[in-house]
Image: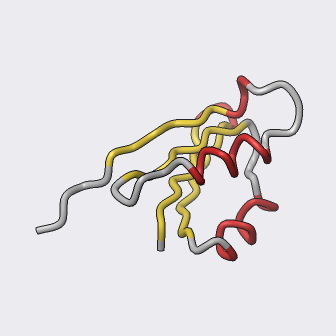
Amino acid sequence: MATKPTERTLDVREIDGPPFDDIIAALGDLESDQRLRLIAPFEPRPLYEELDERGFTHESEERDGGVWHVLIESA
């Protein structure tokens, strides 16, 4: 039975300026048994194509207050 991946969180609401470089850096630091929960104040649609190209899958969910949670894992 596969073990559940551990989860790291990156809340881009805490980043001054565009968060793209921070997101890519966090993805590069992920271990094979980890996933990244991205928290953003908007749906990060431009990121989805980049994730696909880099071999990641994602699930997005809008929560209360218009905050988006995107769960990112290696495909």
- Number of numbered callouts drawn: 0
Q: Is residue 22 left or right of residue 75?
A: right
As displayed, is residue 48 above or below residue 71? below
Task: Give how far across and how far down residue 55 sits, in percent.
Answer: 58, 74
Horizontal side, residue 16 vs residue 69: left or right: right
Q: Residue furthest left?
A: 1
42 over 75 or under it: above or below = above
Q: Position of residue 23 (x, y in %)?
A: 69, 46
The residue sitting at 59% across, 53% down in the picture is: 28
Q: Nearer the viewer, residue 37 or 69?
A: 37
Left or right of 64, for residue 75: left
Please name the residue shown 47% across and 74% down the image: 75
Residue lying at 73% horizontally and 51% vertically, measured from the top left: 43
Is the image coloured rainbow, by chain, by secondary structure, or in one colour? secondary structure
Quarter of the image holding residue 63?
top right
Where does residue 32 sit, x and y in percent of width and height? 39, 60
Determine the image quadrant of residue 64. top right
Q: Nearer the viewer, residue 4 or 32?
A: 32
Q: Residue furthest right?
A: 17
Q: Position of residue 27 (x, y in %)?
A: 59, 52
Which residue is at a point 50% across and 48% down the rendered structure image?
Answer: 36
Q: From the image, which quarter does the N terminus lie in?
A: bottom left
